[in-house]
Image (cartoon, helix red, strand yellow):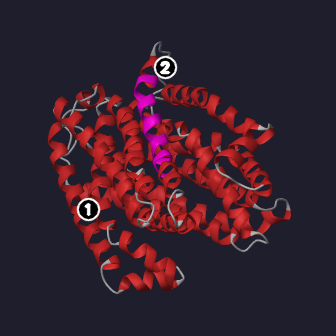
């Protein structure tokens, strides 16, 4: 039986719950920050947690690829076992590095030499990294559960699971201080709430797994998985790599601490506002099943861009800007004034983050992901080139410099991915698409 023609209403119904999921996830991390800010040594604790978070998830970005891998290859129960086994195998090396950072002097070099943390900060970061390492199996199981729900267009369950995540986070922050201290509390709370989220998601995803055919043993699939995944791994790592590179160059400005603090706030606010755009990748990969669907999903993207651009302009180009920065965020006048010029550029991120995410989804759908690896490397290079302005003009506003470098990295990726999609005709149907008949 052929599928119906893809309509904008279907795109919105699929996408809207994912928006809530992303925003609630952002809130959960902010809640951890708020809790750690009330500890005895908030500066050291927050620095340790953020350093551990950045380090761990930068090197273990393989775990994020399992959703895209499942959306393209999960056709039977045997496929699920193979996908988890493959991802776990690839994850072994970075996971081992994380453990070395916890239990060997390598941790002091990473968190002291690279991140510049004090001895206490290094201790907190190593403990937090150890807690985060417990998330490895959780993330693999959560990714496959979410993929099953997306394939069956039950994204609302993902939103429900995120509410469970928030609720369990509150509970964990009540009892974990009885057993842990410092940054380790935040890291363990994050793992606990992700585990609760995963269990809830599997309560619904299980029936969709049971409905899949058992499948058969197959040879050579690991090679296909690797060819598909390695560019996505590099591209995912580039997300953290760009921010890390920007911060390195902001540290060369005359007002380095102010610049780094401001860009951290800017990055958080813009991510909170624009992060839903990243779900265009899963939306395209799941819903696009023939060439005609590309036009529909592109129109959908343009409507989203229009809405988010208007929203950003209202928030940061009107008197509401003061309400957000000074009222909601509680920034002191000097820091708020330093952030204002960069926040005025936030609307530009809507265009290029949306294009980048959509193009990633279409390339993943076509199982043509090599360009994404190149794009990831070029994104970091772009951030380095833009950030190097600080070496020549150390007096520039670090918030503006960081924002421009961040946006330009997305400009480069969207251009390269768009060029690659144009070369392949914007869509390549897989065997599953052809066997299911015309998509809609």
**Foreground: 294 or 319?**
319
Q: Is residue 377 above or below residue 175?
A: above
Residue 253 percent location from the top left of the image: 50, 61
Residue occupying the point 55% across, 30% down: 87
Tell me if 170 is positioned left or right of 248 in this view.
right
Residue to which mark 1 is pinned: 304
Residue to which mark 2 is pinned: 222
Q: Is residue 178 above or below residue 135?
A: below
Residue occupying the point 72% across, 74% down: 38
Residue 281 percent location from the top left of the image: 35, 46
Query: Is residue 154 visible in this depiction of the protein?
Result: no
Q: Which residues are magenta?
A: 226-243
Q: Residues within 10 Å of mark 2 (few under 14, many from 20)?
A: some
Residue occupying the point 18% across, 44% down: 293
Q: Quadrant of residue 73?
A: top left
Q: Is residue 298 above or below residue 434?
A: below
Is 2 a magenta residue?
A: no
Distance of mark 2 from mark 1, alpha carbons? Answer: 37 Å
Q: Quadrant of residue 170?
A: bottom right
Q: On residue 379, which mark appears? A: none
Is 240 a magenta residue?
A: yes
Q: Main secondary structure of the magenta part?
A: helix
Q: Quadrant of the N terminus?
A: top left
Tell me if 349 is positioned left or right of 215 in this view.
left
């Amino acid at each position: 039986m052929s599928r119906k023609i893809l309509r904008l209403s279907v795109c919105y119904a699929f996408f809207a719950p994912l928006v809530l999921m992303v925003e609630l996830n952002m809130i959960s991390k902010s809640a951890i920050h708020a809790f750690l800010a009330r500890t005895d040594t908030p500066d050291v604790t927050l620095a340790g947690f953020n350093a551990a978070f950045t380090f761990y998830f930068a090197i273990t970005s393989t775990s994020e690829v399992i959703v895209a891998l499942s959306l393209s290859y999960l056709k039977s129960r045997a496929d699920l076992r193979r996908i988890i086994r493959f991802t776990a195998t690839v994850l072994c090396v970075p996971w081992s590095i994380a453990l070395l950072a916890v239990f060997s002097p390598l941790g002091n070099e990473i968190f002291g030499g690279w991140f510049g943390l004090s001895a206490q900060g290094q201790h907190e970061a190593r403990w937090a990294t150890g807690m985060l390492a417990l998330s490895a199996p959780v993330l693999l199981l959560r990714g496959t559960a979410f993929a099953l729900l997306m394939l069956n267009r039950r994204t609302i369950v993902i939103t429900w699971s995120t509410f469970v995540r928030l609720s369990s986070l509150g509970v964990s922050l009540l009892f974990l201080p009885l057993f842990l201290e410092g940054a380790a509390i935040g890291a363990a709370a994050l793992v606990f709430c992700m585990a609760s989220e995963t269990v809830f998601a599997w309560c619904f995803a299980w029936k969709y797994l049971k409905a899949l055919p058992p499948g058969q043993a197959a040879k050579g699939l690991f090679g296909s998985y690797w060819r598909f995944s390695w560019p996505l791994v590099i591209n995912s790592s580039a997300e953290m790599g760009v921010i890390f590179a920007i911060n390195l160059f902001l540290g060369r400005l005359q007002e380095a601490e102010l610049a780094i603090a401001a860009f951290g706030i800017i990055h958080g606010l813009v991510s909170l506002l624009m992060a839903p755009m990243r779900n265009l990748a899963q939306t395209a990969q799941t819903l696009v099943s023939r060439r005609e669907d590309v036009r529909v999903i592109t129109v959908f993207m343009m409507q989203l861009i229009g809405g988010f651009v208007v929203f950003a302009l209202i928030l940061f180009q009107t008197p509401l800007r003061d309400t957000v920065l000074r009222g909601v965020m509680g920034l002191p006048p000097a820091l708020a004034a330093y952030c204002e010029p960069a926040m005025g550029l936030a609307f530009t991120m809507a265009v290029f983050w949306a294009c980048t995410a959509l193009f990633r989804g279409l390339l993943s759908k076509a199982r043509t992901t090599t360009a994404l690896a190149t794009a990831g490397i070029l994104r970091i290079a772009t951030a380095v080139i833009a950030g190097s302005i600080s070496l020549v003009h150390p007096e520039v506003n670090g918030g503006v410099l960081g924002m421009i470098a961040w946006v330009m990295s997305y400009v480069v990726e969207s251009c390269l991915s768009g060029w690659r999609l144009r070369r392949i005709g914007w869509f390549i149907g897989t065997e599953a698409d052809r066997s299911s008949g015309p998509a809609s």
